């Protein structure tokens, strides 16, 4: 009822505040990136056009929602914790943005 509607509204508000921008070039990421969170380590690698999403579980879902169509990924570590895998994937995508922004400014100068 009313509590569910409020919870959905609050979750939507928080999600909008925490949106991240992911640089996508030719339906893939600009370069390889990895991130570690807890026991979960995620490696994301760009792939050529037509390769598709070579990713499993939460990484596939997050990459699909981000609009990435060609990527290869690997989850390392002894973790079956899907939440940590998802957080590590998001952390990797955030690092990708930061590295891409610094490399593009270096190219211009």
Image (cartoon, helix red, strand yellow):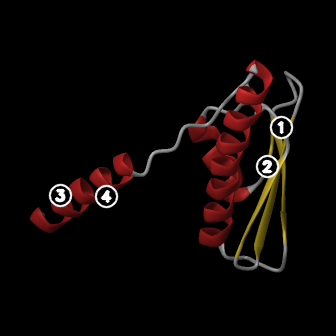
Residue denoted by label 3: 5
- Of labels 4 and 2, earlier in sequence is 4
Residue 9 appears at what percent x and percent y? 22, 54
Dot 1 and dot 4 residues touching (CB under 8 Å): no
Dot 4 and dot 3 residues touching (CB under 8 Å): no
Residue denoted by label 2: 55
- Of labels 3 and 1, earlier in sequence is 3
Q: How many angstroms separate mark 2 from mark 1 (CA)? A: 16 Å
Residue 19 vs residue 85, the one in the foreground: 19
Residue 34 appears at what percent x and percent y? 80, 56
Which secondary structure, mark 1? loop
Look at discs 4 and 3 and give the one toward the viewer: 4
Residue denoted by label 4: 11
Which quarter of the figure has residue 65? top right
Tell me if mark 3 has few (under 14), some (14-19) or many (20+) residues whose alpha carbon lies within 10 angstroms of its own.
Answer: few
Q: Measuring 85% from the left and 21% from the top, which residue is drawn there?
A: 49
Q: How many angstroms separate mark 3 from mark 1 (CA)? A: 40 Å
Residue 4 appears at what percent x and percent y? 20, 64
Residue 50 vs residue 33, the one in the foreground: 33
Which quarter of the figure has residue 35? bottom right
- Of labels 4 and 3, earlier in sequence is 3
- Of labels 1 and 4, earlier in sequence is 4
Look at discs 2 and 1 and give the one toward the viewer: 1
Classify the position of the N terminus by image quarter: bottom left
Q: Determine if residue 97 is in view.
A: yes
Dot 2 and dot 1 residues touching (CB under 8 Å): no
């Amino acid at each position: 009822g009313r509590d569910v509607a409020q919870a959905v509204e609050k979750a939507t508000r928080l999600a909008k505040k925490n949106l991240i921008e992911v640089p996508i070039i030719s339906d893939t990421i600009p370069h390889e990136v990895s991130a570690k969170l807890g026991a979960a380590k995620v490696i994301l690698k760009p792939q050529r056009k037509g390769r598709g999403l070579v990713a499993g579980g939460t990484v596939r879902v997050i990459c699909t929602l981000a609009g990435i169509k060609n990527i290869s990924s690997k989850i390392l570590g002894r973790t079956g914790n899907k939440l940590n895998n998802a957080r590590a994937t998001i952390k990797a995508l955030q690092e990708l943005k930061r590295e891409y922004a610094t490399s593009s400014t270096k190219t211009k100068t």
